[in-house]
């Protein structure tokens, strides 16, 4: 696996592969990799091409008081995992490479509507930071395919909208959430959980499963279902940010007969803010 940290060396290697007729695949990450990230890498390699994985802890997507300074940085371990996963190139730019004029003076990419909902309401500016850095990575790498986990469902929709509206020629693939045996969605922030909290954290998935079953049975009083799910989380020791039933295509509030839904939740447990979602077709 080739390791580079400058745009010039990245583009030089990519140019060689393109001349050889190789497709370029991209998996953007913030490092501290787990099996969910490796699932993205394996799915990318299954599709054929040269796999680029980026690791950059993006300061623009962290708000005031969030965990940017303490976010786990495990580069040597991540490098070893990516070697075994078959990645062809690891790109690890520093902040000056990504934001040469500094964060405050940098052009921002904002996706209206989608970015202000749900996690965007709880974390103002978060999705502008996500859209900006992913847009930059798309231009740096110019991938044919980019893969993202469906655990971050809202993020996936924001990135798809950004790429479509800016005419970036990349196919964006969503990959199903990787879960622990308890059902807890794998996340780098799970390591903030104590042993007791980790066992209790699986309640988030069970609550979403129950909400999804109610929807499949034809229940359509979405506010009542959301309140009941939030109550169950609170009783289980969570501090819910939101539980919401939305239209899967665009996260708008669905009508009673909407056939393609997604149920989403964000809740705090101890030091960790956990998110999860389930698609519901009825």
Image (cartoon, rainbow, N blue to C red):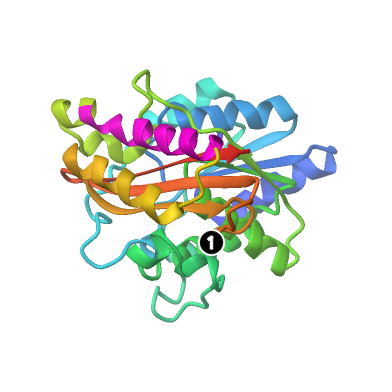
Please tell me which residue lies in front, 208 or 23: 208
Q: Over which residues does the magenta segment extend?
A: 200-217
Name the quarter where the N terminus is drawn. top right
- Residue 150 position, x and y percent, is 53, 41
Q: Is residue 209 magenta?
A: yes
Residue 95 located left or right of residue 176: left
- Residue 165 position, x and y percent, is 70, 68
Residue 95 located left or right of residue 12: left
Answer above or below: position of 82 versus 267. above
Residue at (37%, 18%) from the top-left corner? 181
Please tell me which residue lies in front, 161 or 54: 161
Res. 137 visible in picture: no
Principal SS element in the magenta part?
helix
The residue where tag 1 is placed is 253
Answer above or below: position of 220 versus 237. below
**Could you classify mark 1 by the number of other residues whose Cα lies within 10 Å: few (under 14), some (14-19), or many (20 or more)?**
some
Residue at (63%, 51%) from the top-left corner? 258
Answer above or below: position of 2 versus 63. above
- Residue 199 position, x and y percent, is 22, 25
Answer above or below: position of 192 versus 108. above
Q: Is residue 203 magenta?
A: yes
Res. 49 visible in picture: yes
């Amino acid at each position: 696996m080739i390791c580079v940290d400058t745009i010039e060396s990245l583009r030089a290697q990519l140019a060689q592969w393109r001349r050889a007729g190789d497709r370029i695949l991209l998996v953007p990450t913030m490092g501290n990799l787990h099996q969910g990230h490796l699932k993205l890498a394996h799915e990318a390699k299954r599709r054929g091409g040269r796999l680029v994985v980026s690791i950059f802890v993006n300061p623009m997507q962290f708000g005031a008081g969030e965990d940017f300074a303490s976010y786990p940085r495990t580069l040597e371990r991540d490098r070893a995992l990516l070697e075994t996963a078959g990645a062809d190139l690891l790109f690890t730019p520093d902040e000056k490479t990504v934001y040469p004029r500094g964060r405050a003076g940098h052009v921002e990419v904002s996706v209206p509507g989608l970015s202000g909902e749900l996690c965007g309401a709880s974390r103002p500016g978060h999705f502008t930071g996500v859209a900006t850095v992913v847009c930059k990575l798309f231009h740096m790498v110019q991938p044919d395919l980019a893969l993202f986990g469906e655990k971050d469902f809202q993020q996936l929709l924001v990135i798809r909208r950004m790429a479509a509206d800016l005419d970036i020629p990349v196919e964006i693939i969503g990959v199903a959430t990787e879960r622990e045996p308890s059902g807890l969605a794998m996340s780098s922030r799970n390591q903030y959980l104590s042993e007791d909290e980790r066992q209790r954290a699986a309640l988030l998935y069970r609550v979403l499963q129950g909400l999804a079953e109610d929807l499949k049975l034809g229940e359509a009083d979405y506010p009542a279902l959301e309140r009941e799910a939030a109550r169950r989380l609170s009783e289980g020791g969570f501090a819910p940010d939101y539980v919401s039933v939305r239209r899967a295509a665009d996260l708008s509030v669905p009508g009673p007969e909407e056939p393609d839904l997604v149920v989403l939740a964000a809740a705090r447990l101890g030091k960790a803010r956990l998110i999860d979602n389930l698609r519901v077709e009825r």
